[in-house]
Image (cartoon, grey):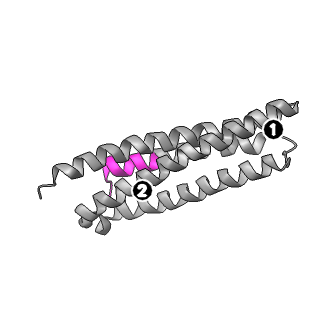
Amino acid sequence: MQLSAGYLWFKALHVAFMVTWFAGLFYLPRLFIYHTDAKDQVSRVRFETMERRLFILMTIGMVLTTVFGLLMLMINGALSYQTWFKVKLLLLLGLFVYHYRCWHWIGKLKAGELPSDTKWLRWFNEIPVIFLLGIICLAIVKPF
């Protein structure tokens, strides 16, 4: 099957915005740790601003990744019958939940609900790696 040139552009933009989204997903939880460790109000306000702005940028990345992914799916609907693609969508659903949890943490930290220790946030910070490796391996290797 010959795919249109538009498909390749959509794929390139899908990957570019996915990188934007993941950059935010990797950095935002690190900001949560710094925010929790901050001792003065000026620093906490600064982290709130950084968190809010980064969340906006990564949400734009998420939306555009989704839009270009859907455009590719419209052109190549056969993807939806592939098992690897269904698993990729399941991981993507988990990533949306993770994104929402980041928004939840922004609200908690802004409200002053600081965890007593950052151990959980440090683990939370590593979760996107699992999604990234899974999604990339599925999309490139197509193991099933």
Q: Which residue is at a point 12% across and 59% down the rendered structure image?
A: 1
Amino acid type indicated by mark 1: Thr
Instruction: Count neighbours of disc 1 (C-alpha within 10 A) and say few if under 14, some if 14 to 19, many if 20 or more.
Output: many
Residue 14 in percent (x, y) is at 36, 48
Location of residue 82 (image quadrant)? bottom left
Q: Earlier in the sequence, mark 1 or mark 2?
A: 1
Residue to which mark 2 is pinned: 66
Mark 1 element type = helix
Outermost left residue: 2
Q: Position of residue 26 (x, y in %)?
A: 58, 39
> Looking at the picture, how far across and down is residue 34, in whole percent?
75, 33
Q: Are marks 1 and 2 in contact (CB under 8 Å)?
A: no
> Is residue 58 found left or right of 76 in the rendered image?
right
Q: Is residue 114 left or right of residue 129?
A: right
The quarter holding residue 33 reads: top right
Q: Spatial distance from mark 1 to mark 2, Cα to Cα?
A: 31 Å
Residue corresponding to mark 1 = 36
State whether residue 112 is above or below residue 27: below
Instruction: Residue 139: say if magenta.
Output: yes
Residue drawn at 86 percent across, 47 percent down: 112
Dominant secondary structure of the residues highlighted in magenta in the image: helix
Q: Which quadrant holds the C terminus?
A: bottom left
The outermost residue toward the bottom is 81
Would residue 44 be seen by someone viewing this image from the given angle? yes
Residue drawn at point x = 81 percent, y = 38 percent: 36
Q: Is residue 129 magenta?
A: no
Q: Over which residues does the magenta segment extend?
A: 133-144
Q: Secondary structure at mark 2?
A: helix
The three-letter amino acid code for the residue at tag 2 is: Thr
Which of these two is toward me, 57 or 101? 57
